[in-house]
Image (cartoon, rainbow, N blue to C red):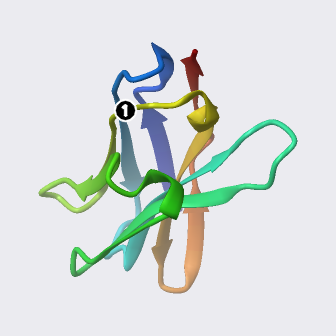
Amino acid sequence: QVQLVESGGGLVQAGGSLTLSCAASGIIFSFNTMGWYRQAPGKERELVAAITRGDSTNYADSVKGRFTISRGNAKNTVYLRMNSLKPEDTAIYYCDAEQEGRNYWGRGTQVTVSS
């Protein structure tokens, strides 16, 4: 089993920054992809950013130029640096990791951006 634990969420004013962290534990071989999703009230969960084992990255258009995803040296940690936050970034942010065709999810961390 693999467990993912997110941290770093909170309340921030518009224009501010936050860095989310996700640490994986358990039986880990090698994650092919790690990423961040978010879900706002009344909306579907959407991809925010993802990073592959080869460090290729992919971002939602709404966060390009503002958010940066990165992996830790041990490759079982993923970060999301969020700059220039907007009220519409308010959501629960979930960490995702894919290993051997199976996806694992964290429980999420709340990010609230006040105007």
Point out residue 32 in the picture as x, y percentages from the top left corner: 37, 79
- Horizontally, residue 57 falls left or right of residue 59, namely left
Q: Can residue 44 be seen here?
A: yes
Residue toward you, 25 or 53 = 53
Residue toward you, 49 or 102 = 49
On-image quarter of the C terminus: top right
Label 1 element class: loop
Point out residue 59 in the picture as x, y percentages from the top left corner: 43, 65
- Structural crowding at the residue carrying mark 1, measured as other residues with C-alpha within 10 Å and reported as few (<14), some (14–19) or many (≥20): some
Asked if 108 appears above or below 33 in the picture, the reply is above
The residue that label 1 is drawn on is 84
Residue at 39%, 44% in the rendered image? 22
Q: Which residue lies furthest to the left in this view?
A: 73
- Horizontally, residue 19 falls left or right of residue 107, namely left
Asked if 71 appears above or below 113 in the picture, the reply is below
Point out residue 66 in the picture as x, y percentages from the top left corner: 34, 46
Residue toward you, 72 or 59 = 59
Point out residue 4 in the picture as x, y percentages from the top left corner: 48, 48
Residue at 50%, 63% in the rendered image? 61
